Image: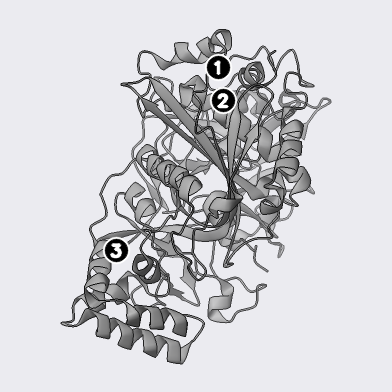
């Protein structure tokens, strides 16, 4: 029996190089090249074609890399209970639960326990909880032989796991069954070791001068996925929206562009698709394309196929989205009625909500939205968010290379959202609290590299978390189902700072969601949400530890008062301070 993982789970929480807890013990997801299915590589040229996800800004953040959907069981008419892809055993050391003996797994995962050897036992469910990783992305088993023997010569390969009186790591002793040398688990856990340079997903080793740390295989910091996100806001012209449908795709547009009569070539292919599967292309779409002048279609094809920028930062993408969201709040979107648009805002539903502090928020319900999320790779911050010398943790990119093109796994989600901003006011934060963040900017205020340290950004990010928690009480969605996207711009010439946030819920393979967020987009219900968001804003059950915290990436923030699901926060629960928000909203 396999371990089911949804495509969105793969992108946000797992991925190549991650350890999953399968029914018979932990397994590691290998590189895409090793994803064998029915004895063949599903990503090979002879395998099934990968379904691509088109999104201009998502690809730009991947330096032009393409995005593909993770294949699923239904695509191959397989039951959910049947494994589609094979994983690999990891870690390869195990602890016999009956005899408390630590050993290296034998061939096919068989037991090498001195007392169980020879028996037909799949010992994968006895895999040890500890592994070693380094900030360069390497992951390996703990070298138990070298750790216990400390360089002394001994042929012993099995160890007694001795648990003495006590509940801490010091009370666990690991003793060689041959030479009787012993070391405590605390000594092992608190030390660093030379890194082996092993990348288990590729089964390869490379040179590494970092020190590896022993860590629990289930620790969050062992692997943090790095994703790029884009809210798809298509061009306002109707023909651009029609040709941007996933069923049409760039391949079909490339084929049409190569013909002498692109319009008729495109229509001929669309009619063939509709004849074989009407759910892919509806007849209304074909009729609208027929009525569109040929020159408009040629121009739209050219625009969609235009070269994607090779390097586009997250900040540039978010600035484009922020401008488009503010424009949609002012004028609505799309400009003319459209059948099932991927992004929709009704101007008549937008309203202003006045807060007691004097701030007037603009609340913009987004009836429909499409979000593309792609996993670029992962980091292993086993000793903190940066290396000891302050360098960022290495990003290990996980893509599939095909014909010189990089393909990253991704998912397209559809749902609804609420966009919140302050269109007519400049936000000011308390100087005494904001100064804590200003001091961290190190004379780089307003640059894209450290905008997260600006107190205005921290204010919006903190408000986002409080509203997510409040929305979950009334909307019918859990906090893990609501994601955030925080916007911030700083005009250096005028020294004005603008911010906003969109909170959205989405799901795969659907035209929308349950409407729980839209139901709260009115004066009365949103006011109740804000009241809940402000409740006990200046207090926490972990005070005074929480309120007096002034760490590198957070102010007053902890899981009891402010933090939400890691997959919901785009900044991994950093750059938060509830007291910074409280001093503006409730004046304390």
Residue 345 x %, y %: 53, 54
| Mark 3, residue position | 304
| Mark 2, residue position | 459
- The single residue placed furthest to the right in the displayed view is 165
Residue 7 x %, y %: 56, 61
Q: Which of 55 and 212 is in front in this view?
A: 55
Q: Say whether disc 1 or disc 3 marks the residue closer to the N-terminus.
A: 3
Residue 486 in the figure: left or right of residue 20 = left
Q: In which quarter of the image is the N terminus?
A: bottom right
Q: Distance between the residues labelled 3 and 2?
A: 37 Å
Q: Nearer the viewer, residue 295 or 304?
A: 295
- Callout 1: helix, strand or loop? loop
Residue 486 visible in the snapshot: yes
Query: Would you identify the image quadrant in which residue 202 lies?
Result: bottom left
Q: Distance between the residues labelled 1 and 2?
A: 8 Å
Q: Sort mark 3 into few (<14), some (14-19) or many (20+) by Cα contacts within 10 Å.
A: some
| Mark 1, residue position | 429
Q: Say whether disc 1 or disc 2 marks the residue closer to the N-terminus.
A: 1
**Residue lying at 50% horizontally and 71% vertically, measured from the top left:** 339
Residue 117 visible in the snapshot: no
Residue 242 x %, y %: 39, 71
Q: Quadrant of the C terminus?
A: top right
């Amino acid at each position: 029996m396999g371990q089911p993982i949804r495509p969105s789970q793969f992108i946000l929480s797992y991925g190549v190089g991650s350890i999953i807890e399968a029914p018979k013990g932990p397994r590691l997801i290998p590189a895409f090249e090793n994803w064998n299915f029915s004895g063949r590589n599903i990503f090979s040229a002879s395998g099934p074609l990968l379904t691509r996800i088109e999104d201009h800004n998502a690809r730009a953040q991947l330096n032009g890399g393409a995005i593909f959907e993770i294949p699923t069981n239904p695509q191959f008419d397989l039951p959910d209970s049947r494994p589609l892809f094979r994983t690999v055993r990891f870690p390869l050391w195990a602890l016999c639960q009956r005899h408390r003996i630590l050993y290296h797994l034998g061939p096919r995962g068989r037991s090498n326990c001195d007392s169980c050897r020879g028996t037909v036992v799949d010992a994968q469910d006895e895999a040890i909880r500890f592994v070693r990783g380094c900030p360069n992305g390497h992951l390996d088993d703990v070298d138990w032989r070298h750790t216990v023997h400390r360089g002394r010569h001994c042929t012993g390969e099995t160890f007694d796991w001795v648990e003495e009186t006590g509940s801490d790591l010091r009370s666990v002793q690991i003793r060689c069954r041959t030479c009787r040398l012993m070391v405590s688990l605390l000594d092992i856990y608190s030390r660093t070791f030379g890194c082996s340079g092993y990348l288990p997903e590729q089964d390869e080793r490379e040179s590494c001068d970092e020190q590896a740390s022993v860590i629990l295989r289930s620790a969050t910091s062992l692997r943090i996925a790095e994703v790029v996100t884009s809210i798809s806001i298509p061009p306002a012209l109707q023909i651009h929206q029609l040709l941007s449908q996933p069923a049409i795709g760039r391949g079909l547009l490339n084929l049409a562009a190569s013909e002498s009569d692109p319009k008729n070539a495109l229509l001929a292919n669309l009619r063939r698709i509709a004849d074989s599967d009407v759910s892919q292309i509806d007849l209304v779409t074909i009729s609208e394309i027929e009525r569109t002048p040929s020159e408009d279609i040629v121009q739209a094809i050219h625009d969609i196929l235009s070269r994607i920028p090779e390097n586009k930062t997250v900040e540039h993408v978010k600035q484009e989205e922020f401008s488009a969201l503010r424009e949609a709040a002012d004028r609505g979107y799309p400009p003319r009625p459209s059948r099932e648009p991927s992004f929709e805002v009704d101007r008549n539903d937008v309203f202003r909500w006045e807060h007691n502090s004097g701030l007037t928020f603009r609340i913009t319900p987004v009836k429909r939205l499409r979000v593309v999320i792609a996993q670029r790779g992962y980091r292993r911050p086993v000793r903190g968010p940066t290396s000891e010398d302050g360098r960022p943790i290495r990003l290990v990119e996980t893509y599939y290379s095909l014909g010189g093109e990089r393909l990253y796994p991704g998912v397209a989600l559809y749902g609804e959202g609420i966009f919140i901003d302050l269109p007519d006011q400049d936000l000011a934060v308390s100087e005494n609290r904001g100064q804590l963040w200003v001091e961290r900017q190190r004379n780089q205020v307003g640059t894209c590299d450290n905008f997260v340290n600006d107190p205005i950004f921290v204010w919006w990010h903190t408000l986002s978390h409080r509203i997510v928690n409040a929305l979950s009480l009334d909307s019918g969605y859990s906090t893990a189902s609501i994601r955030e996207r925080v916007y911030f711009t700083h005009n250096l010439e005028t020294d004005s700072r603008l911010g906003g946030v969109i909170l959205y819920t989405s799901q795969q393979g659907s035209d929308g969601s349950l409407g729980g967020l839209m139901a709260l987009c009115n004066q009365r219900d949103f006011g109740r949400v804000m009241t809940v968001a402000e409740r006990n804003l200046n207090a926490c059950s972990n005070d005074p530890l929480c309120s007096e915290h002034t760490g590198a990436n957070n102010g007053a923030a902890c899981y009891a008062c402010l933090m939400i699901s890691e997959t919901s926060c785009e900044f991994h629960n950093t750059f938060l301070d509830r007291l910074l928000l409280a001093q503006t909203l409730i004046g304390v």
